[in-house]
Amino acid sequence: MDAVLQGILLMADPMNIGLIFVAVLIGVIVGALPGLSSPMAVALLLPFTISMEPVPAISMMAALYCAGTFGGSICAILINAPGAPPAVATAFDGYPMAKRGEAGRALGIAAISSISGGIFSLIIFLVATPLLAKIATSFRPMEYFALAVFALSMLASISGKSPVRNLIAGAVGVLLGTVGIHLTTGVERFTFDLPVMTGGIGFVPVLIGLFALAELLNQSEAADKAYERIKAVVVKLPTREDFRRIWGTILRSSGIGTFIGVLPAEGATVAAIMGYNEAKRWSKHKEEFGTGCPEGIAGPEAANNAATGGAMVPTLALGIPGSATTAVILAALIMHGFRPGPYLMKQTPEFVYAIFAAMLLANFMFLVIGLAGAKVFSRITLIPRSFLWPAVFVFALVGSYSYGASLMDVWVMLIAGFIGFVMLRHSFAPAPLVMGLILGKLVEESFSQSMILLDNQWWRLLESPIVDFFFVLTVLSLCWPLISTRFGRGG
């Protein structure tokens, strides 16, 4: 309890509260702009937090993460162009409701569902993170290796349409993670005799390139695309009748979103789609879905915001990213000198609870901002992309250079951006590559340590029940698409 109070007191500083408010405002704006996303915004913000204290720096990113997820619902409802992938399902019923003159009602349902899902997941975050970290303190390198392999197997469903493409992208990320000096043997790999490459490829330039520059190039073809906009927007809180219809959906989707968020490498997009599908499955008004059904808005919004708190659990307790955005936050933790995992909870628990307090505060802030400023944010979508994307490019250049004050990082960012653009053109999602880059180091290091402990007898890995458990989960994860298709056809 003392650690909880210390964490809350850390966030009680007026400067920290002000920074969180700024991050929430940026997050809602980013979410409301088609084409921009939370991972992109957090990646661009990361290098600018180098000189900041760790608590406000990580808190800003966590707050932006929460607000950006909600912000995507604004343009999904008003212009049928989801500002972020998690808001795709929201548009199915949000836009039809807005077209019939109930945009304010749709935004109100989205806002209340979002904060409900967010708070639900943060309660689980508060309880589950210490418990999971306590369990993880008994993990040896063998268990961490099996856990990381399982997390990599989950990349098949993280984003994109093809599980095979996701696994290929993840494998490329693992390969990039091997660049530099091997910590166990001291052997240099893929450095091309360049001293600057001996330390490996920096996370930050790659993140900026894949999430910002690649999307800039991908969106360049739609620079003049026009959207049909809903102009009259006055947000209305859900009525008693609306609450009666959606409260069960909110609870169900909050649980689904939190569970999906806790799974390594999953995220808000998967949670939102599952939340929408389950809302439709349990609804008494299935025929209304797709025409402006309240449950069709509440389901995905509660789920995708619940996934944000859930995704922070494995990120902080195990050092395994729960989503693409938490992968960036994990890189920020490492950059600020923290060791994500059970020792983070053991040595600096107040820091973890400060992040909890920041995310809780962010949920209430984006509720107020979203309700009071929906009309303003609806006008943000009018910003021409010819102005928006050059600004993103400048931030990408400055951010990648400021990370290490090296032109090499700028070149890495530009190359990563071009690779990301090619990937997007061929239906390869960038998120699995980032996950592979981060998890690859954990896989390699834990495997090397395991082989030293086991005297290179790899089959002794199976002596651990925990390792066996994670390997079984890995096989099921990789085979699940085939199993589900087989049973689906059989039914």
Image (cartoon, rainbow, N blue to C red):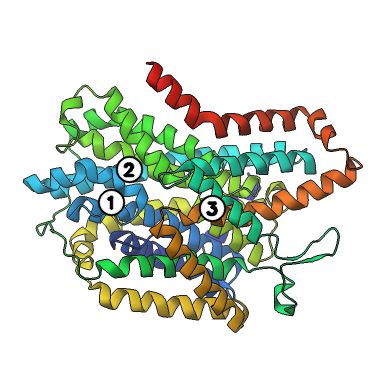
Which residue lies at the image location 85% right of the left edge and 44% below the top edge? 451
Q: Say what secondary structure mark 1 lies in.
A: helix
- Locate residue 222 relative to residue 448 in the image: left or right: left
Query: Which callout, 2 or 1, points at the residue further toward the start of the chain?
Result: 1
Q: Amino acid at mark 2?
A: Glu
Query: Which callout, 2 or 3, points at the residue further toward the start of the chain?
Result: 3
Residue at which label 2 appears? 301
Gap between marks 2 and 1 measured at Cα: 8 Å
x%, y% of residue 222? 25, 66
Residue at which label 1 appears? 73
Gap between marks 2 and 3 measured at Cα: 28 Å
Number of marks drawn: 3
Which residue lies at the image location 38% right of the left edge and 74% below the top edge? 392
x%, y% of residue 138? 78, 38
- Locate residue 376 relative to residue 125 in the image: left or right: left
41 vs 155: above or below: below
Residue at which label 3 appears? 169
Between circles 2 and 3, the one closer to the viewer is: 3
x%, y% of residue 97? 14, 43
CB atoms of marks 1 and 3 within 8 Å: no
Gap between marks 1 and 3 measured at Cα: 28 Å
Q: Amino acid at mark 3?
A: Ala
